[in-house]
Amino acid sequence: MPLVSGKELIKHALEGKYAIPAFGIVNLEGAIAAIEAATETNSPVIIQTTQGGIEYAGHAQLAAIVISLAKDATIPVALHLDHGRDTKYHQKAIELGYTSLMIDGSPLSFDENVKITNQVIAMVRENNLNLSIEAELGKIGGKEDDVEDEGSTYTSVEDAINFIKQTNGGVDMLAIACGTSHGFYTKEPHINQELIKEVYAQTNVPLVLHGGTGVPLEQITEAVGNGVVKVNIDSELKQGIIKGVMDYMEKHPEAYDLRKINRQGIDYAKAIAISKIKAVKAVDKNWL
C-alpha cells in the first residue's frame, strides 16, 4: 500500500503501547532487510534516510526504492528524513513524498534550534501536509554520517518543556539525549530511564531513542514503557549486511553473483532487525 503518515504510526503506537522500529538505509539491500523483517513479524516500520545517505545514493533514488517496496508491502511503512540539518532536504523530501521529517537543530543554540524547527513546522503547515515532525534537543554524541560529536549532554527537563512551548505544538516526536550515542559503543550504554519518564511526563510528547545500535534489548524495552515511541537502528543493520557478504565470500571466494552474495547480507541484517522489532514490542501490531 502507499506510504502511511508518521502521525498515523505514532497514534497506533501510543494506543498499542509499543514503539515504531526505525531503520536507517543507504541502499536497496537495507530497505529490503527492514521491510522483510517487519513483514515477518507483522510490524509497522519506518525507513529513514540521512543527509549523508542521500549524498551517497541520491535523494530521489532512495525515496523511489522505499516507495516502491511500500506499495507491495502488507504492513504500514513510513519514509522519514533523519537528521535533516539543512531545510533544503526537508523541502526536497516533501516533494518526493516523504511522510515524516526530522529537523536536527541540536548542534545549534537553544534559540536557533527553536527557530529552525519552527521553519520546518511552517513549511509543513503551509502545504497542509499530514506529516510527522521530529526534533532533537540535547547532544546525543557519537558519529552520525561523517559528523562526529565529542560527547553527549543530557537533555534538561526544563529545556524540553520550553522547547515544546516555543514550537507551538508542532513537534510530534522529540529525540532527547538520555545516555545513548550514534554508532558503536566502546562500553555498554546505560539509558537514563528516569529522565525519559520525567521528560515525557512534563511535555506529553512521544520521545525518540537515537543510537539504538548495541543497546541491550532489555533497556530498549524499558525505554518504550517509559515514553519512547520510536527507536532508531542504523549502524548495526549496515554492519549486518557487511558481515553477511563477507561470510559468503569467505566460503565462496570465486563468487560473482551479486544476487546470492547480497541475499546473505540481507538475511543477516534482517535477523538483527527482527530482534529490535521484538524489543520495541511491535510484533503483530500491524493494523492494516
Image: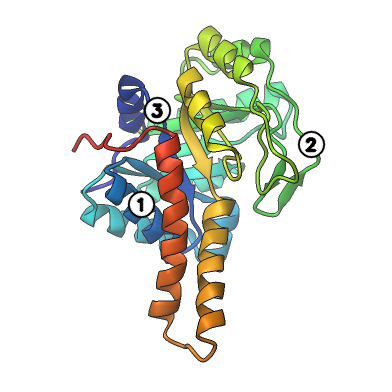
Query: Which residue is at 37% across, 40% downward?
Result: 99
Q: Quadrant of residue 261?
A: bottom left
Name the residue nearer the viewer: 194 or 4: 194
Instruction: Tell me which amino acid carries mark 2.
Output: Gly
Q: Position of residue 285 (x, y in %)?
A: 28, 34
Mark 1 Cα shell of 10 Å, populated few (<14), some (14-19), many (≥20): many
Q: Residues within 10 Å of mark 2 (few under 14, many from 20)?
A: few
The label nearer to you, 3 versus 2, is 2
For numbered disc 2, what is the local secondary structure? Answer: loop
User: In this orientation, does residue 244 appear?
Assistant: yes
The residue labelled by disc 1 is 37
Asked if residue 130 shows in the view, the reply is: no
Report how many numbered discs are placed on residues in the image.
Answer: 3
Residue depicted at 33% across the width and 47% down the height: 38
Which amino acid type corresponds to the residue marked 1 in the rendered image?
A: Ala
What is the quadrant of residue 270 in the picture?
bottom left
Q: Which mark is residue 125?
A: 3
Q: Which residue is mark 2?
A: 151
Q: Is residue 86 left or right of residue 99?
A: right
46 displayed left or right of 208 = left
Residue at 32% from the left image edge and 36% from the top image edge: 5
Q: Is residue 206 above or below residue 65?
A: above
Counting residues from the start of the chain, the first of labels 1 and 2 encountered is 1
Q: Residues within 10 Å of mark 3 (few under 14, many from 20)?
A: few
Q: CA distance from mark 1 to mark 3?
A: 33 Å
Dot 3 falls on a residue whose secondary structure is helix
Q: Quadrant of the C terminus?
A: top left
Q: Residue furthest right?
A: 150
